[in-house]
Image (cartoon, helix red, strand yellow):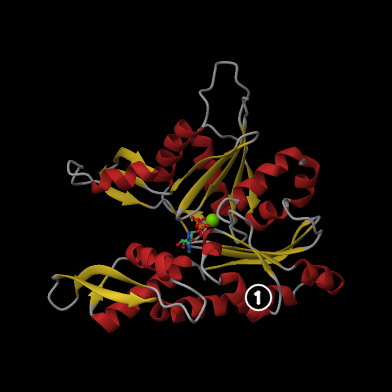
Amino acid sequence: MFTNEIVIDMGYAQTVIALHGKGVVLKEPTVVALARQGKKVKFYASGFDAKRYMRGRDRDPLAVLVHPVKGGFIEDSDAAILMLKDFLRKALPKRGLFSPRPEVIATIACGTSVVERKNYENVLAEVGLKSPILMETPIAVSSQLSCDYNLIATFGASVSDVAIVGPSGIITGCSVTMCGNAIDEKICAYIAENYRLGISPARAEELRTKIGSFYSGQTMSADVSGRNLVDDSPAQAEITSGEIAPMMTSVLTSFATVVESVSMMCPEKFILDVYNAGITLCGGFAFSDGVADFLGDRLKMKVLVPKNPDEAIALGALAFFDDRDRMYKML
Ligand SMILES: Nc1ncnc2c1ncn2[C@@H]1O[C@H](COP(=O)(O)OP(=O)(O)OP(=O)(O)O)[C@@H](O)[C@H]1O
Ligand SMILES: [Mg+2]
């Protein structure tokens, strides 16, 4: 079935592209391998291919791996355009001469400024996606929920959103930087201080997703390699779940206080509805072991995690193509 209705959820870690009638058609790391010489930009690969290219033996020595999106906005427009062009080529069916103009919903963080929205629109126009609908991530998620009023948190790699969403859109909400990357930076600092070992945030993330847990009894361990900070020699250390847990709980405890502040701004007449509906937690971080129990315990509310929390934003936005009246009321 041909479809011209597209959703793009482009985050720091991952880009999800979904097509109406098909669902998720692309889920790849938001990275590009490119080389810059003066004003010239040479594109090599995007997503998984970019990571493979950078590990390859005959890569251009000038090539670097760029993350074009960070903190909920496009930091590097040139790189974002190159990456999106390649992703769309991979994900979309070939367009004919008489194919209808694609319609696009692009998801954004709640706190995206007017300038950042404009920049996002320009980037999409450059890849042939004109007049996009920009949709805040909690609104996207709300389409899949059965209650009218919902407290929605999307916890990502570089930005997290918390909002109360009702039938007319966001009632109150904000974007914060308590997110996966913040934990990974703390893990890097901990390992540097305690093991004199320098590791990259990407290694810290691998470690966290492998052995990190919010359950205090977890006893998993894993080796992590990096550079000895004293003599720069290759070195490694064995890290346990118990060592990672304080970094995870400290960021999530701060996040819980943000959720509390947002709930406190909820108009009184909706409080009971919101409380009964519980918190819906999405974003890749919602896969973390024990995160729903941890947050639920702190906030004394039930926390619901959809089956594929990293796809829930894109799929939620996609569902709005079937209910445009509802969508326009919420934006
Ligand atoms: N299985 C997993 N267990 C624990 N954490 C995970 C898992 N999979 C992904 N994550 C974490 O989820 C985060 C990425 O989530 P997501 O894909 O929603 O972010 P993003 O949309 O790319 O980023 P952002 O929206 O913040 O710019 C990362 O911090 C990653 O480590
Ligand atoms: Mg995201």
Instruction: Say which amino acid is labelled 1.
Output: Gly
Q: Ligand 2 is found in which quarter of the picture? A: bottom right
Quarter-wise, where is residue 34 in the image? top left
Q: Position of residue 112 (x, y in %)?
A: 58, 57
Q: Residue at x 51, y 55 (%)?
A: 73
How crowded pointer 1 is (Cα within 10 Å; few <14, some 14-19, many 20+) is rated as some
Q: Which residue is mark 1?
A: 296
Left or right: 228 with respect to 330?
left
In the image, is residue 136 above or below residue 278? above
In the image, is residue 215 above or below residue 148? below
In the image, is residue 57 above or below residue 86? below
Q: Quadrant of the N terminus?
A: top right
Q: Position of residue 241 (x, y in %)?
A: 41, 76
Q: Residue at x 19, y 76 (%)?
A: 229
Quarter-wise, where is residue 8 in the image? top right
Q: Residue furthest top?
A: 97
Left or right: 126 with respect to 98?
left
Q: Position of residue 212 (x, y in %)?
A: 44, 71
Q: Position of residue 113 (x, y in %)?
A: 58, 57
Q: Determine whether the beta carbon of the residue marked 1 sits less than 8 angstroms from the nearest atom of ligand 1.
A: no
Which residue is nearer to you in this view: 78 or 84? 84
Which residue is nearer to you in this view: 226 or 178? 226
Element under label 1?
Answer: helix
Which residue is nearer to you in this view: 62 or 299? 299
Q: Residue at x 61, y 55 (%)?
A: 307
Tag count: 1
Q: Residue furthest right?
A: 269
